[in-house]
Amino acid sequence: MKNIIITREASGFEEVKDLFINAGFNPISFPLIRFEPVEIKNFNLEDYEYLIFTSKNAVRYFFSQIPKIDKKIIAVGEKTAKYLENLGYKDIIVPEVYSAEGLKVYFEKNIDTFKDKKMALIRASEGMDTLLNSNFKIDLIPVYETKLNVPENVDNIKSLIEDEKIYAIAFSSPSTFKGFLNIFKEESKKLLDKMLTVAIGKTTKNFIESQGFKVDVVPDKFTFEEIVKKLKVMGKD
């Protein structure tokens, strides 16, 4: 059974581990990030026609402070949309590409609908400025922040990688890769060369490559389900 390191936060690992197990892999949790809530400030719901939620975490942290909304909703990804639907929200817009760049393309394709609409971008305090630097009226409303995390199993993970017992490591955001570099520093390249490097999407891929590292696997659709499918096919070669 091939070992796969999952670098997302601990609760996120629990959400995806069965995908890997059911595909014949052994997922290992190595949470390189953790989340902390941010108090929502200077936010007037009535100022906005659309709210953009970038993840389930954005939804969770937003509604922990704002109990209910009556606005048009845009969600990045099917899982974010499903989470909103489970809260009772309907008619959610889900752009085809699950990223900030995908949102921008969607807005540009539908410019007559969005050009004069004020939108709130609900996400972590850190992230790409793709939408904020666009020509659309978008305000950042941070509801949580991402902190680098040092897991308890660093020594064990390092030993497994050095012994070439890891098939792949999956990075779910630029922050998870920052967390890897934060721990292993100048040893990072030597360790990454011993396994496949997986980036969940183009944003993560571009960041990893900007740091001088190579990416071996990027799924066509930016989900863990697609990562599992791709690794399963590659594992048969």
Image: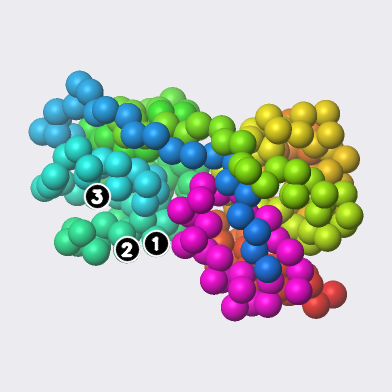
Q: Position of residue 155 (x, y in %)?
A: 75, 44
Lower position in the chain sequence, tag 3 or tag 2: 3
At 20% from the left edge and 59% from the top edge, which residue is drawn? 87
- Give the magenta-colored segment's residue range: 1-25
Q: Residues within 10 Å of mark 3 (few under 14, many from 20)?
A: many
Quarter of the image for the N terminus: give it.
bottom right
Disc 2 target residue = 82
Disc 1 target residue = 78
- Which image quadrant for residue 165? bottom right
**Left or right: 121 in relation to 170:** left
- Above or below 61: residue 91: below
- The answer to whether any part of residue 183 appears in the image is yes
In what element is the residue under mark 2?
helix
Mark 3: which amino acid?
A: Ile
Q: Position of residue 170 (x, y in %)?
A: 66, 53
At 81% from the left edge and 54% from the top edge, which residue is drawn? 160
Mark 1: which amino acid?
A: Glu
Residue 63 in magenta?
A: no
Residue 18 in magenta?
A: yes
Q: Pointers 2 and 1 in contact (CB under 8 A)? A: yes
**Left or right: 150 in relation to 234:** left
Q: CA distance from mark 1 to mark 3?
A: 13 Å
Disc 3 target residue = 73
In what element is the residue under mark 3?
strand
- Which image quadrant for residue 137? top left
Q: Residues within 10 Å of mark 2 (few under 14, many from 20)?
A: some
Quarter of the image for the C terminus: give it.
bottom right
Q: Pointers 3 and 2 in contact (CB under 8 A)? A: no
Q: CA distance from mark 3 to mark 2?
A: 12 Å
